[in-house]
Amino acid sequence: MQEIEWKISDDPVPYEEALAIMEERVGQIREGTARELVWLLEHPPLYTAGTSADVSDLIAPDRFPVYEAGRGGQYTYHGPGQRIAYVLLDLKKRNSDVRAYVQDLEDWVIDVLAQYQVKGEKRCGRVGVWVDRGFREDKIAAIGVRVRRWVTFHGISINVDPDLSHYSGIVPCGISEHGVTSLVNLGIPVSMAEFDMELKAGFEKIFLEQGARGSIIPKASPRPIQTRE
């Protein structure tokens, strides 16, 4: 089972349902009975709390449902117009380097944003991808991962065109001195279908072709395939 499965959900997926599916798939990947998976989806409006979340950062607890995510990080928002990529990979097939894997996720987002002439940047001590707007730095993509027996799950969320006012109910990722942005907020309208195509191409570049830091799939592996539900 060398191929990576790609699944795209057209309708918003309830958060608890997504967690249950990932939990089951992680076990199957570990047992060798299912392929690794990249799952692209959206959620209904909600907040999630990572393992480092500080309850004081939850400003409006009654605004949207709040879920304990089990991933790393603090509070974040998910909702329509935000592309979620849940990435379930077996790091034992690579080099068991979680830090390198997170850096690969950041590089993946940065390369995709570059296709829209947006310069995504990393920041020391701040996981995720940032855009320097001159007058401030805004976060455009959040990353939160969990690893169980060397199989990764959760992943990245990229703001394509969410309602950015929904972030006001939390201190996103515990960082109050910076803002959030999206491609549309930056003046770049893009459809989710088009963005998904760029995500697939960017994934292949980072995770299939470059052999970056030895943490990814060997170049000889087949091209990812897609399923849609």
Image (spheres, rainbow, N blue to C red):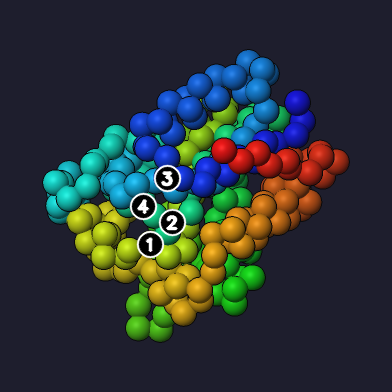
Q: Amino acid at mark 2?
A: Gln
Q: Secondary structure at mark 3?
A: loop
Q: Element type at marker 2?
A: strand
Q: Are marks 4 and 2 in contact (CB under 8 Å)?
A: yes
Q: Residue at x 35, y 77 (%)?
A: 136
CB within 8 Å, label 1 to label 2: yes
Do the CB atoms of the residues marked 4 and 1 lie less than 8 Å apart? Answer: yes
Q: Where does label 3 land, which residue?
A: 12
Q: Is residue 99 visible in the rendered structure shown here?
A: no
Check disc 1: other Cα within 10 Å, few if <14, some if 14-19, many if 20+: many
Residue 75, position as x, y percentages in the image? 29, 48
- Determine which residue is flagged by label 1: 162
Q: CA distance from mark 3 to mark 2?
A: 10 Å
For the C terminus, which image quadrant?
top right
Kind of residue at badge 3: Pro
Question: Looking at the picture, does residue 95 appear above or below residue 48?
Answer: above
Q: Which is more foreground, mark 3 or mark 2?
A: 3
Q: Earlier in the sequence, mark 1 or mark 2?
A: 2
Tag of residue 79:
4
Q: Is residue 226 visible?
A: yes
User: Which circle's residue, 3 or 1, is located before the other in the chain?
Assistant: 3
58 vs 13, nearest the viewer? 13
